[in-house]
Image (cartoon, rainbow, N blue to C red):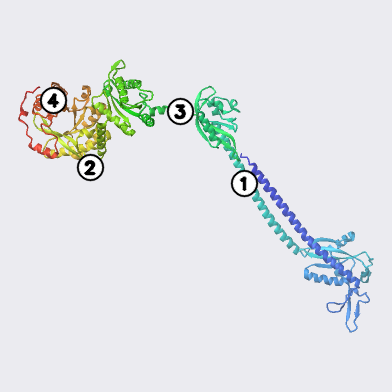
Amino acid sequence: MRTRSPIVSMTVLAAVLWSAAVVASLGWGIVQADRQALQLAEVEAKSNLKRDLAFRRWATSQGGIYVRVTERTRPNPYLADIPDRDVIMPGGGMLTLYNPATMLREIKNAQTELYGTLARITGEQYLNPINAPDEWEKKALSIIKQTGDDYSEVTSIDGRPYLRRIQPMMMEEGCMKCHAWTGIAIGELRGATDIAIPLGQYEAIANETRFWLASTHGSAWLLGIGAIGFISRRSRQHEEAVRSHQAVLNKFKQAVEQSASGVVITNAQGEIEYTNNKFCEINGYAPGEVLGKNPRLLKSGETDPALYDDMWKSLAQGKEWRGEFKNRKKSGEVYWCLETISPIVDKMGAVTHYVAVIEDISDRKFAEATIRQLALYDPLTELANRRLLRERLDQTVAWSSRAGKRVALLYLDIDRFKAVNDTLGHHIGDALLKAVARRLCLGLRASDTLARLGGDEFAVVLGDIDGNADAETVAEKLLEAVREPFIIEEKELYVTASIGISVYPTDTDSIDTLFRNADVAMYHAKACGKNRCQFFGEGLAIQVASRWDIENSLRRVAERGELFLEYQPKMDFRSGRIYGMEALVRWNHPGIGRIGPDRFIPVAEETGEIEHIGEWVLHTACAQAQAWRREGHDLCVSVNLSAVQLRQRSLRERIEAVLQRTGLPPTALELEITESAIMDDPDQAVATMQRLCTLGVRFAIDDFGTGYSSLSQLKRLPVSVLKIDRAFIRDITHDPDDMAIAQAVIALAKTMHLSVIAEGAETAEQMALLRSMECDSVQGYFLSPPVSPADFDVFLASFTPHPWVKLHTVPPRVA
C-alpha cells in the first residue's frame, strides 16, 4: 500500500482549514450584514418615533390645531365632548380641532404613501376603533408596560418582513384635554406609538453586501487555495528534489563504495576523512588505519619529486590534476597507480576538501611495456626494430650535428642465409640469427644501436665518429665476428656477411636517403662478391639516381605505350623447325632511350609495377602468337614469369582470361620461371604451377643451374622444359667444366623425361656440339637475335634449316 506523502496531507489540511476560515468569515460577514441592515431599520424606526414624539409634544403644548372644515378635514366625532371642538370664523366658515393624535395619523398615512412605513397610535383604552391594538401590539403593550422602554421585533405583514417598533406614550398635562376620560393619571402609560419599517430595501443592501462578501471571500478562497497549491507544488518539488538528491547521493555513495577505483577524500589540511572499499583493497589498509592520516603514507620514494610539485601547483590554482605515481602498499609492494585529484571548493571559492580517484595500473603498465617491446623490438633477437632504429638514428643525428660529429649507418646482410633455412630448417635459421645478434652486440659500443630489420638484415647506427675510417674499422670487426663458426644444435655453421655503409652528412643530410644509400651499398657489396663492406660513393649515387628515375618513370609505363616486345626464335634440333619464340620486353624510355629488362624488371618487382607490366607482356605476346598461328605458323610462345607474379593468388584466373581474350590455345603458351623465383616459397610455387597446369599451359625452368634448387625440389615441380643458362653455353666448346655441366643437365632432363633447351648459342660450333649432346632445342644469336614482330615475319619467311642439322653426329671441338 502506497503511503501518502506528508506534504499531500499537509496540503489537504491547509486547504480544509483555509476553506473553513473563509466560510466562517463569510458567515460572520453575512451575519454582520444582516445585523447592520436591521440596525439601519432600527435607526430609521427610532428616528421616526422620536420625530413623532417631538411633534406630539409640540402639538400637545399648543392644545391642538384648528383647521378649516373641508371634505378632507371633517370634525372629529370622537372629540365631540370637547366644548370648543368647532369654532365659527367671523367672516364665515368653521374651524375644527385637530388633536395631536389625528395630526400624527395624517402624517403617518403620508409617510406610508411616501416611504412604505406603517405608523399608528394604539392603546388599551381608545375611542376610535382604528386605534385598537392588533395581536402584536397587545403583546408589545404588555412588554413595554412592564419595562417602560421601547420594544422592537421583526415580523411579517402581508407576507413581507417588517421591523416593528413600539414606543410608550405617557400621559402628560396637555393630553388631559382629550384623554381625561381614560382616567389615566399624568405620568402613567396612556398608549404607544407604533411604527413598522419595511425591510425590503435593507435586505437589498444586505444582499448586495452578501454578494460582495461572497465575491471577495470566493476570490480570497481561490487565491488561498492557489497559494496552498503553489506552496504545495513547490514543497512537493522540493521534496522530490530532496528525494532525488538523496537518491543520487545514495547511488553516488553506492557507486563510490562499489567503484572499481579507489576513492579517498581529505580535508584541506590533507587528513583522510573517507575511503571506499577499493582504496583499502588496493593498498591493504583497513579504514581505521588511514582515517585521519595523510596520504603521504603511501609514498614509495620512487616517484620524481617534480611530479608532486606539479600536482600541488595545479591544485593550488583550483585545477584538477591527473598523473601516475608509484605508491607502496601496506605489505611494502610498490605498484603503479593512476590518480585524479580534484579540489572541492565552497561558495566563496575556498578549498574545503580534496577528492582523489586511484586506479591500480600495474597490469596496464606491464601491458604497455610488453606492447612497447613488441612495437620497438624484434621478438626473435630482442634487438631494436626498424621503428626504434629510426628514433635512435634521429636522436644520434641531432646530437652529432650539434657536436660536429658524423654518423654512420651500416646495413648488414648474412650471405646465403636462405640456403641455411631451406636445407637445415627455419628453427636452425632462427637460432643462427639470435647467435649472430649476440655476437654483433659484442663488437659494438654501448652508445651504438644494433637493430634487426627483418629476415637476415641487420642495421647499426654509429654515432660520434670522425670519418669513414672509424666506420670501416667497426664494419671489419663485425665481418670478422660473423666469419667465426657458429655451433647450432651441435652443427658447425659457417656464414659471411655483406655490409653497406652510408655516412651522415657526407653522403646526404636526409635520414630517408641515408637508409636508401646504405641499402644500395649493401647490395653492391653482395654484387661484388659478398663477405665485404662497401661505402656509398659517387658512382653508387649515380646508380641510385638512375634507379629512382627508372622507378618514377615506370608508373603506368604500359598505358603510355613505351613498352614493346621482341621475339627470339627457338629451333628444334630434330626437325630443324622453328617451333616457337621467347617474348622479351623492352622499354623505350623517353629520356634515357632503350632500356633492357635487366635494368627495369627488378625495380618493377620491388615497386609492384611488375603486375601491370607482366599482364601487358602476357596479353601482347599471346595476341601476337595467335596472329602468327592464324597465318599458318604452328608456334609456341614463351613468356617470363617473375617471382612476384608467381605469388599472385589470382594468377590462374588472369592467365585464363588472357587466353580467352586472345584465343591462343593453352598448349601454345609456355611460362618460364627462374629457380630463385621458385625457391622463395617452394610449396606455394608448386601449388600455383599445378593450378596453371590444369589450363594446359607448360612450364620451363629458366637459367637452370644458376640457382640452388635441389633434385628433390625439382622432382616436385610440374615443369616440362629445362633451360640451360647462357653462362654455360658461352664457353662450352673450350671449357670442359661448362661442357660437363651442359651434359649433366641434358642427362638429368632425359632421366626426368623433360625437354631441354640451350640459350645463348652464337656459333656453329656451339650448335653442332649441343646437337651432338642430344639437346632438344636451342635459341641464340646464331639463329637470330630478338627482333620486332615485323622482322620476325621476315625471319620466318626466309628461314631454312642448315645442312648440318640433318647430320647424326658432328664431332665436337674441344679446347
**Taking the image as drawn, is residue 523 in sight?**
yes
Query: What residue is disc 2 on?
Result: 560
Please state if 141 lies on the left or on the right of 641 as rendered.
right
Residue type at mark 3 is Lys
Q: Are marks 3 and 2 in contact (CB under 8 Å)?
A: no
- Which residue is located at x 50 percent, y 32 percent? 323
CA–CA distance in space, label 1 to label 2? 84 Å
Tell me if mark 4 has few (under 14), some (14-19) or many (20+) residues whose alpha carbon lies within 10 angstroms of its own. some
Of badges 1 and 4, the one in the foreground is 4
Please state if 166 lies on the left or on the right of 783 as rendered.
right
Q: Earlier in the sequence, mark 1 or mark 2?
A: 1
- Rendered position, 92 above or below 635: below
Q: Earlier in the sequence, mark 4 or mark 2?
A: 2
Element at label 1: helix
Q: Earlier in the sequence, mark 3 or mark 2?
A: 3
Image coordinates of residue 10 in percent, x first then y, are 66, 44
Q: How many marks?
A: 4
Q: Which mark is residue 216?
A: none
Q: Toward the viewer: 317 or 584?
A: 317
Of badges 3 and 4, the one in the foreground is 4
Of badges 3 and 1, the one in the foreground is 3
Residue type at mark 2 is Arg
Q: Which mark is residue 233?
A: 1
Q: Earlier in the sequence, mark 3 or mark 4?
A: 3
Query: What residue is disc 4 on?
Result: 731
- Rendered position, 209 above or below 331: below
Element at label 2: loop
CA–CA distance in space, label 1 to label 4? 113 Å
